[in-house]
């Protein structure tokens, strides 16, 4: 689903560098369709009769596309010609009897919706024994640009020849597109991807530029904290910011996330935008241009919507600050389907669509006596936490999970201690064990309900040195990072300052306990003693504090310089 703003191929310029347009988006979607057609899962069908037989058939893999542009949603679909002699019920009619039609939704300000049944604008491309739907889908993709040019008329050509984009063409009704996606999939569930070049700024779900004013927001800690906080998590944001648009947007995206989670709809958002060159007269600087600036996207709000629906937010940035060389001369410009942006977009969509995944997921971790689940990490994981975890560990419900999904939990000792089932008190016996069992209940792509169970038994120890010796650096650093993110997201008192300090304090606490409770306590006080398995922990913590997620945006000695990272870059990490 693409945003088609500006340029003869869609939105091609946000400043000095090209971004993606319709052709790049359509080329990427067509490539995803080809790959899905080749890799469509098969299922076994048992035919009962005098002699039972088992046959295999391709599982339905449906894909559809629509556009949002200016102040409308455009749904192209294939319908029977009016002058056709075939009946509508005839499924074997000639494809030449069909024509392309469009359904347009112009109500994007109050109550957008999906105007067509899902089967009318999606196509079962996974059926390799019958390629009729695949041909229809290819026909939609091939005629898409022509349809949009016909709908937009002379205004599109005038924008292509203009050096500046009119205000009308800066509109983005992505919020209405998200509502239409949720409405279309509420009965069946599924995955949807929004491809856009800017934040929704028109119609329902419009997000204002909370970064307007630039440095003034980065000079005060509370103002910067507000920029990286999604509008969904700030209930009284209007009283703080003095802008009612924020609380309306917060209610919209909070409700949309809850509805998508309820109907098992997973939303992915892919954003591609280029570098802007902006005047800095308002900054008090003598320079005429500020390079390497990007249009504000409100990554915090959009990524929070993806988190609530178990989707993913991808920011495909184009510009020299990423170390990417983009050819800007017309004589040396790459073709639409060979540009870096198009290649990156294709690979990102293919990676997401082809990953082994499950839907309607329920995760639960059980522990043996003496140990219990304290919390998930970060405190707001993907999906919804069910249960308070007081009597038993809380369950985690997710609308979608794939092979790249990870779940981290924090454990704690339980009153009463570990039950000694191996009589470890006797001489020569082994120490007691603790057991963990994780269960993931999910629905496969073929529609089957499955459960994956993993059981792990670990040996306990009363010697602290054994604990440090068996520590895994990757696990420790992952938990430290997720705890730091939780320190930022804390509802009332979360802040970047607290997150940076806690990274330092946690590192000091680990090393101090190692020195006090192991043989390292006999070493000279001036000598730094590190556990062998955690020798790189101090270096990691120092690097984490300087990572763009946690570092200061403005240097104290250069308050008028360009903020780096910006709020979007900090949230993206």
Image: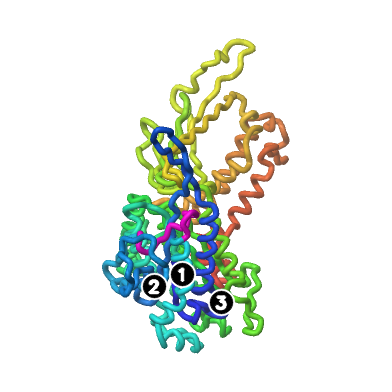
Looking at this view, name the residue that lies furthest to the top: 426
Circle 2 crowding by C-alpha within 10 Å: few under 14, some 14–19, many from 20: some
Q: Which mark is residue 423?
A: none
Residue 152 position within the rendered picture, expressed as x and y whole percent measured from the top left: 40, 82
Q: Nearer the viewer, mark 3 or mark 2?
A: 2
Task: State yes or no: discs 3 and 2 in contact (Cβ < 8 Å).
Answer: no
Say which residue label 2 marks.
Answer: 100
Quarter location, residue 423: top right
Quarter location, residue 535: top right
Say which residue label 1 marks.
Answer: 139
Q: Tell me which residue sits at (31%, 60%) in the image.
A: 89
Instruction: Please give the range of residues in magenta.
Output: 119-131
Q: Is residue 121 magenta?
A: yes
Q: Tell me which residue sits at (44%, 72%) in the image.
A: 3
Task: State yes or no: discs 2 and 1 in contact (Cβ < 8 Å).
Answer: yes
Q: Going by the image, does 82 lie left or right of 396? A: left
Position above or below: 116 against 187: below
Say which residue label 3 marks.
Answer: 18
Q: CA distance from mark 3 to mark 1?
A: 27 Å
Q: Quadrant of the N terminus?
A: bottom left
Q: Secondary structure at mark 3?
A: loop
Residue 37 position within the rendered picture, expressed as x and y whole percent measured from the top left: 51, 56
Front-lying residue, 561 or 150: 150
Residue 560 can be seen, yes or no: no
Q: Tell me which residue sits at (32%, 59%) in the image.
A: 183
Q: Closer to the N terminus: mark 2 or mark 1?
A: 2
């Amino acid at each position: 689903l693409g945003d088609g703003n500006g340029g003869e191929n869609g939105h091609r310029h946000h400043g000095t560098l090209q971004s993606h347009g319709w052709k790049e988006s359509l080329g990427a979607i067509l490539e995803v369709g080809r790959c899905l057609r080749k890799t469509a899962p098969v299922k076994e069908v048992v035919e009962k009769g005098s002699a039972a037989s088992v046959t295999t058939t391709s599982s339905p893999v449906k894909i559809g596309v629509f556009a949002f542009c200016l102040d409308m949603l455009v749904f192209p679909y294939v319908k029977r010609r009016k002058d056709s002699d075939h009946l509508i019920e005839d499924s074997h009619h000639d494809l030449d009897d069909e024509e392309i039609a469009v359904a347009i939704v112009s109500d994007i300000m109050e109550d957008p919706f999906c105007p067509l049944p899902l089967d009318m604008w999606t196509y079962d491309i996974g059926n390799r024994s019958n390629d009729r739907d695949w041909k229809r889908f290819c026909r939609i993709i091939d005629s898409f640009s022509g349809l949009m040019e016909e709908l937009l008329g002379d205004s599109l050509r005038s924008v292509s020849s203009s050096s500046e984009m009119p205000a009308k063409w800066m509109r983005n009704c992505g919020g209405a597109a998200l509502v239409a996606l949720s409405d279309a999939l509420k009965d069946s569930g599924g995955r949807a991807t929004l491809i856009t070049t800017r934040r929704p700024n028109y119609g329902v779900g419009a997000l204002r530029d909370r970064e307007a004013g630039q440095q003034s927001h980065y000079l005060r800690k509370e103002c910067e904290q507000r920029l990286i906080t999604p509008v969904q998590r700030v209930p009284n944001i209007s009283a703080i910011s003095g802008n009612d648009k924020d609380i309306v947007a917060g209610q919209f995206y909070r409700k949309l996330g809850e509805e998508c989670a309820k109907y098992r709809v997973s939303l992915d958002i892919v954003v591609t935008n280029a570098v802007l060159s902006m005047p800095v007269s308002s900054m008090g600087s003598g320079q005429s241009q500020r390079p390497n600036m990007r249009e504000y996207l409100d990554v915090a709000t959009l990524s929070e919507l993806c988190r609530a629906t178990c989707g993913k937010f991808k920011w495909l940035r184009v510009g020299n600050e990423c170390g990417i060389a983009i050819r800007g001369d017309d004589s040396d410009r790459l073709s639409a389907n060979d540009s870096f942006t198009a290649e990156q977009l294709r690979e990102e969509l293919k990676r997401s669509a082809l990953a082994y995944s499950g839907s309607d997921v329920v995760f639960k971790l059980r522990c043996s006596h003496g140990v219990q689940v304290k919390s998930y990490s970060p405190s707001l994981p993907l999906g919804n936490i069910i249960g308070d975890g007081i009597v038993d560990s809380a369950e985690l419900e997710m609308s979608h999970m794939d092979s790249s999904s990870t779940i981290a939990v924090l454990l704690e000792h339980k009153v009463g201690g570990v039950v000694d089932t191996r009589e470890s008190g006797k001489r020569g016996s082994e120490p007691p064990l603790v057991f963990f069992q994780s269960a993931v209940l999910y629905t496969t792509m073929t529609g089957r309900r499955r459960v994956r169970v993993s059981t792990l038994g670990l040996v306990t120890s009363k010697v602290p040195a054994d604990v440090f010796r068996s520590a895994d650096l990757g696990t420790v650093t992952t938990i430290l990072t997720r705890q730091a993110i939780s320190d930022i997201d804390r509802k009332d008192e979360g802040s970047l300052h607290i997150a940076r300090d806690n990274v330092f304090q946690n590192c000091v606490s680990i090393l101090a306990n190692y020195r006090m409770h192991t043989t390292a306590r006999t070493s000279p006080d001036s000598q730094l003693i590190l556990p062998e398995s955690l020798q790189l922990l101090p270096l990691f913590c120092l690097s984490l504090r300087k990572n763009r997620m946690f570092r200061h945006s403005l240097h104290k000695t250069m308050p008028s310089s360009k903020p780096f990272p910006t709020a979007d870059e900090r949230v993206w990490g």
